[in-house]
Image (cartoon, rainbow, N blue to C red):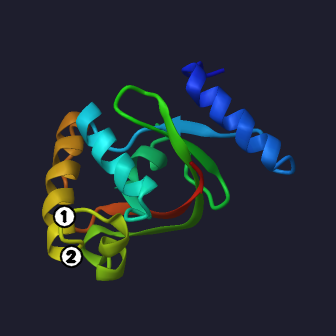
Amino acid sequence: MTIYKNSVNVMWQKYRAENPTISNKFEAWAFGNSPSMADELGKLVMNGIKTGTSSLFYWYDQGLEPMPSVGSHVVLLDGEEEAMGIIKLIGVKIMPFNEVPETFAYLEGEGDRSLEYWRKVHTSFFTNECDELGIPFEEDALVVCEEFEVVYK
């Protein structure tokens, strides 16, 4: 059983009280790889600008993380690991990095929301992840593209 800060459990219980038919299963995590990035990206989500995220399929293929699934809930954390809100996954697609469309780059809500910006930032991010994993990053690496909506603030 994962232990979360009190704000996570309180927020989840309030959400469940308003939505008693949903499963009690949820995850809690922050976007990015630093507290400042978690705060920045979390604010984009809470303001309705960021409605998508992507990750390397490798994490799921190797059993290192559970595969995201439509309908699942995430309590979004800030840089201090406090609850910001709850998102629900509404779409999950797996595709090669070099085939991610401009429409998805826009959903990620970062920078100028262009595909060029998305590829630049994510090439760097995924390359660093691959370096840590001891594998090469390649342009046709599979990525998991998730779409979500904020269901609780």
Q: CA distance from mark 1 to mark 2?
A: 8 Å
What residue is pinned by disc 2?
Answer: 114
Badge 1 vs badge 2, beta-carbon distance below 8 Å? yes
Neighbourhood count class around disc 1 (C-alpha, 10 Å): few under 14, some 14–19, many 20 upward: few
Q: Amino acid at mark 2?
A: Ser
Assign the N terminus to one quadrant of the image.
top right
Q: Position of residue 135 (x, y in %)?
A: 22, 44
Q: How many marks?
A: 2
What residue is pinned by disc 1?
Answer: 111
Left or right of 70 on screen, residue 14: right
Label 1 sits on a secondary structure element that is loop
Identify the residue at image location x=19%, y=64%. 111
Query: Which of these two is toward me, 109 or 33?
Result: 109
Neighbourhood count class around disc 2 (C-alpha, 10 Å): few under 14, some 14–19, many 20 upward: some
Q: Position of residue 64 (x, y in %)?
A: 46, 37
Label 2 sits on a secondary structure element that is loop
Identify the residue at image location x=26%, y=68%. 140
Q: Is residue 114 above or below residue 82?
A: below
Q: Is residue 67 above or below residue 63?
A: below
Q: Is residue 88 above or below residue 30?
A: below
Q: Position of residue 76 (x, y in %)?
A: 49, 42
